[in-house]
């Protein structure tokens, strides 16, 4: 979201247990009001958990004097590095049962620090969990094993600089621990931008995006951070891997593609050269309403299979549109946006609107050229998009269960998949909670050959059993995805929560190859144990 | 090239030693005429080599009765599977010193055949060299080792069917042994096309494209077959890897990206789901002349960094332009082409022409919308593009040395790289042959962050020493590429000829991981030994 890049940054405090800024969390009154809408929730919100109430023991390992300046065993940073920000993590914190709190938190400032820390950890059987912004929603930054002597969270955020900019090639060398806003701040004076704006933009880092193959700003074309990666620098226990800066190559399997998505299991990404762009000067956006969601899917397919390549092409079903305030009459809503640094984009928007109207889309007056947000629906959707994770935490405090998950599949399978998720996850939620569940769907990214639907599940009814309910719904959803051959994740990564689905999805010979690669690079098995391979 | 897809196909005979169709090779008179232009060549062409004159011994291994129907030890197929079609291969055949002739040639018709052949080969230490069209120009399909009991060429071309088409998702399941024209023939009735047109289109297969990360039709955007790959089926000695059909995924490192570019060293690609397109209905193309090649580079960069995404954006230096008949006054020539199935593309062409003119481009009247070939320069370039490999063989018969190699680098490094190749390879060629060499350059693919230059080196002067001269020039070129951190190959693959450059380029930890993956999938080390890893 462009808006996020210009959000004011202050010395605000991050929530240790929930999403984002502590002061942006809904207050008790807001939580109570949300809960009142959902039968079966608590009468009043669970209290905000305090670090002082956590049981944080003495660390199980102590680094040598030479590394002591990089490592802390203080309770606050340890608690804040215990988990990511999945619903499962938030509710565990609220229920006083957070994940394993790491023994140590390290803050390396350069590659050699990372290499030294890995060497020490390998010698002492200390699990190392790389940590960027900690916004994982799949259990990617915690330790769930029991075979290591101790656990060290490796926080990269002291490595937060744009080190070099090549304006000719429009690329920059950037340290992995750089948060989204800081990254854009350092690029802005050069008239350049990465334009990678995941929902977590404010609270996630370049290294995290790379390690998890994050999805970003663009709904078509270059949807993942992979597409913006020119080269990677990765510190592994077996040495540092530095690929060359290349616009493209055909020299064997791509080295970068092995580390993209490796989730800290093969090495620690410390920096990357990434591809930049000029800031867009031309924009046009509009939204259309559809009575029939399945007809809207066909309209979106027509746009995705054209040459138009909208930057934004997000289809909200009626529930999602209502939640975002983008529709009040039960319509599905398609939000379209075009942008360019080169030339006006009105013609492309007009062509896309024609395609959408041919499939039943109504409305779609385009917004003024330079104007963003465009129309009311577009603006409503944008602000809801950024506010949603905070509201999820408020609902968690009311004992509701909220799950968001995403996938991707080909067009021929998409309608049946969406129907199956609604039916089967809906039934499972009603059966386990005793209350009807809300299941909303939107398409976040679209391709000529398929699309990425994103589901939000909202259920309530058995406060106290939230984790078990969430695990059950996750399992049911994973089964549906598997049966429909839809990926276990389009851009949320595998982490630990998606391991069962991932293990069924990946080809077994690839798993053999990945395990062998892991063993070659991480012979002591200390890197983010449990992620991707055992 | 669109033209190639509609070329008539007959029962013409493939040359066993040279490029393409035997009857398309230049005749003796044409060879002599070409040689007369180059001081230091032979007075008359080397004779076309005959299989009957080759020393083809008894095979060193015999398959079991159960596989006998798939395998031949006849001299003709064995000779035709001994090498690829690099200059080095052609001249070795002409000089009566072809590469090691395989003991056996197998023609599997289904996956189980491939698995059975691999199992037998593993048990008997028989090297297996996967073979599609055999058009490798980097020594990718021959055996140069001495540690295997026998060598079997695994020819996939009996697996040549489009098995399934999903018109909703615009994708098809296609067997790996399908040649380019046969593939397009089977898609055409459905109104769809893969639009992957490497120079080798007529003589190469889908499996070969995938295994070597071939470069295709598009000069921007989706330049490699990688981008059109939805899923892969790969038979390995450790089992068959079948990835899911997904438009995109974020579930761990991409399984397909490990096998794309694996050059037969990790497994045998037997089929793939590939992404298709509608045939373009709108086209526009034009060419511009530039006095200053370096100014032209800047013009191309401006186009590559715009949103225009031309399908064709090929910059020919003055030598290349003269050779193609696209220019007679020493100008460099930029060939631009746009195409779309959705909407007219004149506006985009006009914008691209404006950008080129701002950097000194002259001319560029656009051709009629539906017209292809567009203008004279565009047409001349296209026909030269397809004729060039045959002319190379004619020059080889005159004892000239011809080498083409390609690379990619970022814009900031590109001008110095091109100058260094001209100077250093030119000097090396003059020193070793005693005659000045011709070095031409064109850009084949362009990216926002860099471009892929393609060099043609033409030298003559020491007939009889062609292989040594070629090896020397290849080594000098590889050194220049390494020093400038330009990839050893953008789309010709690594094979055996590029191994020294590849070994210096890839990060050592990645090499560790790749070796481990190879050992896990190919424990007996029988798959294309010597390619990528030892």
Image: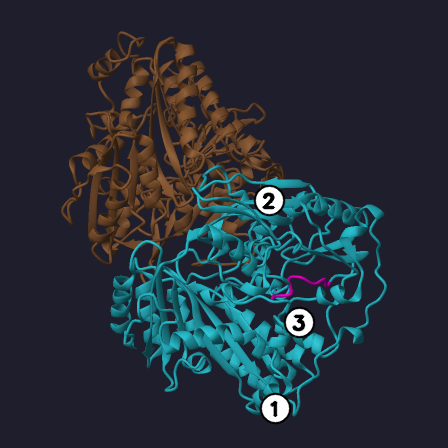
Chain colours: A cyan, B brown
The label number, if any, that marks residue A233 in the structure image: 2
Instruction: Establish if A199 lies above or below B403.
Output: below
Where is residue A191 drawn, in percent x and y? 44, 52
Where is residue B342 drawn, in percent x and y? 24, 58
In the picture, measured across the screen, residue A303 lies left or right of residue B252, that is left
Mark 2 vs mark 1, foreground winner is: 2
* Disc 1, SS: loop
Instruction: Establish if A142 lies above or below B449.
Output: below
Task: Give the quarter of the figure containing the C terminus of chain B.
Answer: top right
* Disc 3, SS: loop
Mark 3 vs mark 2, foreground winner is: 3
Q: Dominant secondary structure of the magenta stretch?
A: loop
Q: Earlier in the sequence, mark 3 or mark 2?
A: 3
Q: Chain of mark 1?
A: A
Which residue, given by chain and number where applicable, does mark 3 sit on? A15
In the picture, measured across the screen, residue B79 lies left or right of residue A212, that is left
Q: Residue at x 23, y 48 (%)?
A: B349
Task: Give the quarter of the figure containing the N terminus of chain B.
Answer: top left
Q: Chain of mark 3?
A: A
C-alpha distance separating marks 1 and 3:
27 Å
Res B97 visible: no
C-alpha distance separating marks 2 and 1:
50 Å
Q: Residue at x 66, y 71 (%)?
A: A15
Magenta residues span A136-144
Q: Nearer the viewer, residue A224 or B145?
A: A224
């Amino acid at each position: 979201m462009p808006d996020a890049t210009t959000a004011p940054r202050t010395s605000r405090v991050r929530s240790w247990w929930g999403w984002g800024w502590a002061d942006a969390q809904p207050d008790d009154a807001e939580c109570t009001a949300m809960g009142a809408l959902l039968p079966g929730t608590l009468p009043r919100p669970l209290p905000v958990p305090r670090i002082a109430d956590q049981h944080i023991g003495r660390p199980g390992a102590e680094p040598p004097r030479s590394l002591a300046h990089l490592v802390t065993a203080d309770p606050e940073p340890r608690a804040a590095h215990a988990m990511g920000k999945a619903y499962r993590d938030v509710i565990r914190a609220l229920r006083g049962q957070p994940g394993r709190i790491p023994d140590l938190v390290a803050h390396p400032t350069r590659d050699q620090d990372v290499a030294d820390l890995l060497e020490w950890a390998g010698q002492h059987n200390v699990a190392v969990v790389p940590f960027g912004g900690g916004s994982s929603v799949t259990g990617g930054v915690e330790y769930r094993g029991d075979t290591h002597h101790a656990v060290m969270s490796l926080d990269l955020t002291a490595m937060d600089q744009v080190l070099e900019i090549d304006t000719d090639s429009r690329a920059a060398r950037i340290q992995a621990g750089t948060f989204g806003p800081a990254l854009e701040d350092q690029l802005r004076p050069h008239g350049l931008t990465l334009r990678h704006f995941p929902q977590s933009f404010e609270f996630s880092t370049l290294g995290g995006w790379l390690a998890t193959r994050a999805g970003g700003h663009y709904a078509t074309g270059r949807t993942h951070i992979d597409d913006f990666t020119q080269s990677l620098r990765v510190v592994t226990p077996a040495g540092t891997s530095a690929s060359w800066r290349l616009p493209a190559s055909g020299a064997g399997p791509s080295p970068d593609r092995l580390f993209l998505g490796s989730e800290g299991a093969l090495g620690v990404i410390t920096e990357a050269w990434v591809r930049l762009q000029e800031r867009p000067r031309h924009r046009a956006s509009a939204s259309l309403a559809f009575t029939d969601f399945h007809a809207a899917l066909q309209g979106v397919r027509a746009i995705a299979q054209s040459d138009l390549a909208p930057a934004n092409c997000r289809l909200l079903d009626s529930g999602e549109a209502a939640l975002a305030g983008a529709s009040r009459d039960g319509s599905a809503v398609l939000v379209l946006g075009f942008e360019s640094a080169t030339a006006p984009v009105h013609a492309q928007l007009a062509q896309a609107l024609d395609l959408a109207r041919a499939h039943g889309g109504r409305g779609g007056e385009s917004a003024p050229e330079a104007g963003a947000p465009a129309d009311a629906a577009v603006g409503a959707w944008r602000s809801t998009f950024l506010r949603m994770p905070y509201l999820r935490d408020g609902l968690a405090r009311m004992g509701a269960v909220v799950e968001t998950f995403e996938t991707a599949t080909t067009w021929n399978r998409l309608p049946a998949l969406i129907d199956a998720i609604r039916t089967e996850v809906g039934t499972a939620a009603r059966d386990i909670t005793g209350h009807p569940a809300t299941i909303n769907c939107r398409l976040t990214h679209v391709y000529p050959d398929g699309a990425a639907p994103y589901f939000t599940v909202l259920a309530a009814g058995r406060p106290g059993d939230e984790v078990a309910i969430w695990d059950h719904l996750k399992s049911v959803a994973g089964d549906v995805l598997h049966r429909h051959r839809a990926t276990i994740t389009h851009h949320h990564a595998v982490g630990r929560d998606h391991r069962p689905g991932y293990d069924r999805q990946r080809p077994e010979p690839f798993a053999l190859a990945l395990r062998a690669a892991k063993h070659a690079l991480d012979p002591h098995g200390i890197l983010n144990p449990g992620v991707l391979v055992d």
